[in-house]
Image (cartoon, rainbow, N blue to C red):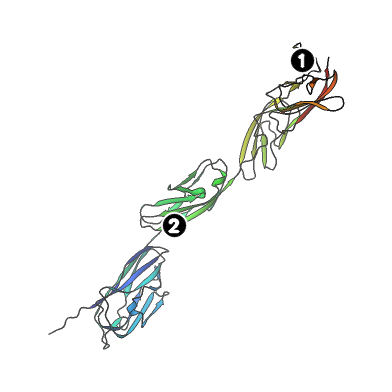
Amino acid sequence: DHIVTTPLEAIAGNGTTCIGNAVVSPLQLNYFNEVKSFQVKLTYDFDLVSCDGYINLNPELEEGFSANIIPDIGEIYLFWEGESPLSLPEYAVMTELVFSALLDGNSAVNWETGPGESEFLDQYGQQLNVEYHTGNLRIYTRPEIEMVTEQEICVGETISIHPLVEGGSGAKTYIWSGPGGFQSSDSILSLSNIQADQQGLYTLQVYDTLQCDDASSFQLFVHPLPEIAFAPYDTLYVEPGYELHAGNGYRDYLWNNGEQTESIIVDSCGEYGVQVTSYDDCVATETIQIRWSAISIYLPNAFTPDGDGLNDVFVPVVRYDFVATYHMYIFNRWGQMIFESSDMQQGWDGTYKGKQAMGGVYVYRIDYSVSGSQSQKSKTLTGNVVLVR
């Protein structure tokens, strides 16, 4: 009678990954019965993958196991010799080979079966019958992103970034992230009316249908617009010869009268406009109406507090649309303040501490500021008023 022995199977597993990632090929042993030792040689395409080592060695094989990996020529040598013959369960994992993916393509994981290259021996030193199963490692291209590394823009402008994505397999998924929790799934990054808080690093990740991916980033710099000095005002009430200043420290100035200086001398009423360009090429424009300032406060030179209803109170006549702040003081001939008010409608009735003041000359002082004044400086009016009894 002939005894039929099932051949031992040495199986190299398959794996897939993307360029730049790792891939594992498990080495399995089936019908591993009463084996005393083995030595095997495996080869792979070292242009496509590189073997980095092995993991998850079967605990039953730890004693007496050794390996020699030569990545420069794509060869792997595995050795084991036990103290006694060993049997393993069906499809037991010997170990797992770890490869780094270098290029797109297919690399076989071959068992070399030439004389003295791969053999499994029993306790008598007899070579066992073995079937070797080749593995396959499939390496896929990953998307490759090309885009700008930095971009400069001014506040209020719009930007569109068109990345070039090549390689990868199937449809692509785009994920943008940026400052302030920004997220987008558009293939093109478009930002309009950009503000200063949108400055920062923007990152794009692209995934293909096989989940191979690539990432790239660019830095966005957001430059402020020039701050024009008279921007807070729609209208200024000034006198002829007034110097209208646009602000200093910028590269270029262009007024609507053709001047190209930081400031101009106003010689007529009307609308004045300026375009200011910063050293970052950011441009701001402003216009303003210039009006001549007339007398803003009219003061009588005498009053008669006799109760006849005519000229009983010393009160200035104020242009309320022109005067922003106001405070009036009245002093007697000795410099003593006898009246004050910040109410433009409240005048002096000729009394002091509830009693009638003596007739004669009194001094007034009014501190005020003008609406629309670019300088916001206070003005002062002083003079005399006669109290007639």
Q: Secondary structure at mark 2?
A: strand
The residue closer to the viewer here, 133 or 62, is 62
Picture quadrant where residue 154 is located: top right
**Outermost residue to the front:** 354
Q: CA distance from mark 1 to mark 2?
A: 88 Å
Mark drawn on residue 214: 2
Q: Quadrant of the N terminus?
A: bottom left
Q: Check the image and report above or below for 271 versus 62.
A: above
Q: Quadrant of residue 336?
A: top right
Q: Residue furthest left?
A: 1
Q: Which amino acid is tagged 1?
A: Asp
In this view, 150 is above or below 106: above
Q: Give the amino acid type for the residue marked by disc 2 in the picture.
A: Asp
Rendered view: 134 above or below 178: below
In x, y percent, where is residue 59? 34, 77
Horizontal side of 274 relative to 359 (left or right) equals: left
| Circle 1 residues within 10 Å: few <14, some 14–19, many ≥20 | some
The answer to which of 331 and 381 lies nearer the viewer is: 331
**Image coords of residue 344 (percent x, y):** 71, 23
Tag of residue 312: 1
> Which residue is outermost to the bottom?
124
Q: Which quadrant, please, contains the C terminus?
A: top right
| Residue 208 screen position, x and y as percent | 38, 55
